[in-house]
């Protein structure tokens, strides 16, 4: 199978490229490097010993997309490209809606014109909103998002579902029935076990694991834990942290599934096991061999207390489940961070 990864130089895309290449599939990547480096793609080639076709391009550039799709003729597109910083999306909502929604609309138009009909999309558990109670199942109604980033995911899911409905009807104009797989990620963390690729956030990290990693390596002096007065055993929020290579392998299964099925299908990609913030601090301290210093701060606006997946549907239908536990997550995150203290720089 030939796969085209938009945003494939980014954190999840680069790990998925490794998993696809190792499963024997071909990979082409489109990225505008808004939040990534071509070095990540070189390292994917180093890990796998295989070549990747790399295009520097913006997914919202229709002429360029037509040219690349025409040249590559992929069997399946996995659409990672997007802006993802929650706080920044509150500051720059128009830029977030423009980039994330435009990219998806342009890709759909170009796929239709090029006769490409298999699409896997990076969605997020954030679409469950605040009112559902975990474990989240795919049939729960989507909730109310707390920020523009979350709404772009919510809206892209809707756009893709509507397009799929039209794309399975003749008058939709699609040359083959459209197949859409929506993957709702829980909290992707960790790195490839080689330590050659990993998460490389620009500026001060917003997310827990990269922040802890940078404290561990001495780039920041302590972690602030956002609230210890939640109704949980240790008072801190609980999340479903999933190893990025497990997530990557989930994409291989999802792309293979898209090839053999029609329709729009949603899958949670999570482990089903929650960990608290302090639980993660302890696990990371074990992995790096010293205690991570932390202070308790106020709650962060927009945080939900609990979020974890019911991972049963992906196991039943895709034959996929997460295999790596919290210790492997922290070991691999630390291996990446300690060997690349400044990321890809
Ligand atoms: P990332 O920023 O590392 O990767 C996204 C990539 O897309 C980057 O390489 C960026 O340069 C590229 N990009 C952005 N806009 C583009 C455009 N218009 N054209 C071409 N390239 C463009 O982020 P990631 O963590 O790898 O996330 C991948 C996808 O998964 C995103 O859509 C993100 O919203 C989604 N997601 C991520 C998480 C997470 O915790 N990391 C959770 C849920 C969903
Ligand atoms: C966040 C986003 C979510 C997005 C996801 C992508 C918010 C409200 N949610 O999820 O929409 O899909 O990132 O990865 O921003 N924490 C600390 N100190 C820190 C950083 C985090 O205590 O310095 C805590 C948070 O309060 C939370 C947990 O760690 O309880 C995980 O936070 P984070 O890694 O940012 O992920 P989410 O909030 O789950």
Image (cartoon, rainbow, N blue to C red):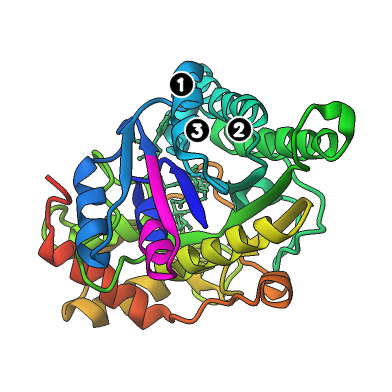
Q: Nearer the viewer, residue 219 or 105?
A: 105
Picture residue at 20% right of the left edge, 51% below the top:
42
Locate residue 84 relative to residue 337 in the image: left or right: right
Give whichever of discs 2 and 1 has the lower sequence position.
Answer: 1
Picture residue at 23% right of the left edge, 66% below the top:
47
Give the image quarter of residue 339.
Answer: bottom left
- Residue 145 position in % (x across, y down): 66, 39
Label 3 to label 1, Cα distance in Å?
A: 30 Å
**Quadrant (top left, top right, bottom left, bottom right) of the C terminus:** top left
From the viewer's perspective, is the residue at label 3 or at label 1 nearer?
3
The reply to whether residue 295 is in sight is yes
Question: Mark 3 highlights which residue?
Answer: 69
- Residue 214 position in % (x across, y down): 20, 57
Question: Mark 1 highlights which residue?
Answer: 92
Q: In the rendered view, would you say 174 is above or below 15? A: above
The reply to whether residue 305 is in sight is no
Q: Nearer the viewer, residue 132 or 96?
A: 96
Residue 21 magenta-drawn? yes
Locate residue 190 relative to residue 165 in the image: left or right: left
Give whichever of discs 3 and 1 has the lower sequence position.
Answer: 3
Locate residue 199 relative to residue 150 in the image: left or right: left
Q: Residues within 10 Å of mark 2 (few under 14, many from 20)?
A: many
Residue 240 magenta-drawn? no
Label 2 to label 1, Cα distance in Å?
A: 13 Å
Residue at disc 3, secondary structure = helix
Picture residue at 49% right of the left edge, 52% below the top:
2
- Residue 265 position in % (x across, y down): 75, 55
Picture residue at 27% right of the left edge, 66% below the top:
48
Give whichever of discs 2 and 3 has the lower sequence position.
Answer: 3
Q: Which mark is residue 152?
A: 2
């Amino acid at each position: 199978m030939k796969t085209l990864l938009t945003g494939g130089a980014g954190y999840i895309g680069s790990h998925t490229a490794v998993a696809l290449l190792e499963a024997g599939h071909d990979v082409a990547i489109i990225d505008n490097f808004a939040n990534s480096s071509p070095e990540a793609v070189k390292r994917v080639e180093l890990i796998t010993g295989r070549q990747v076709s790399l295009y520097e391009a913006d997914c919202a550039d229709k002429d360029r997309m037509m040219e690349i799709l025409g040249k590559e003729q992929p069997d399946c597109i996995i659409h990672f490209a997007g802006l993802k910083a929650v706080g920044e999306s509150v500051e720059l909502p128009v830029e977030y809606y423009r980039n994330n929604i435009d990219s998806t609309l342009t890709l759909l138009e170009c796929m239709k014109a090029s006769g490409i009909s298999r699409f896997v999309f990076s969605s997020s558990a954030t679409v469950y909103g605040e009112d559902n109670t975990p474990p989240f199942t795919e049939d729960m109604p989507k909730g109310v998002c707390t920020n523009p980033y979350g709404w772009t995911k919510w809206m892209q899911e809707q756009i893709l579902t509507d397009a799929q409905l039209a794309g399975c009807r003749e008058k939709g104009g699609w040359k083959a029935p459209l197949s859409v797989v929506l993957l709702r990620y829980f909290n992707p963390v960790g790195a490839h076990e080689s330590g050659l690729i990993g998460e490389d956030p620009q500026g001060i990290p917003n997310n827990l694991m990269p922040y802890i990693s940078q404290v561990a390596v001495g780039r920041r002096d302590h972690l602030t834990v956002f609230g210890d007065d939640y109704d949980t055993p240790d008072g801190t929020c609980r999340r479903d942290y999933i190893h990025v290579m497990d997530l990557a392998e989930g994409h291989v299964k999802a792309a293979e599934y898209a090839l053999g099925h029609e329709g729009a299908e949603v899958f949670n990609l999570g482990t089903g096991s929650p960990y608290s913030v302090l639980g993660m601090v302890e696990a990371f301290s074990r992995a790096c061999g010293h205690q991570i210093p932390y202070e308790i701060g106020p709650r962060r606006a927009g945080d939900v207390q609990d979020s974890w997946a019911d991972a049963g549907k992906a196991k039943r239908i895709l034959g996929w489940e997460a295999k790596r536990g919290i210790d492997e997550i922290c070991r691999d995150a630390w291996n990446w961070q300690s060997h690349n203290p400044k990321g890809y720089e």
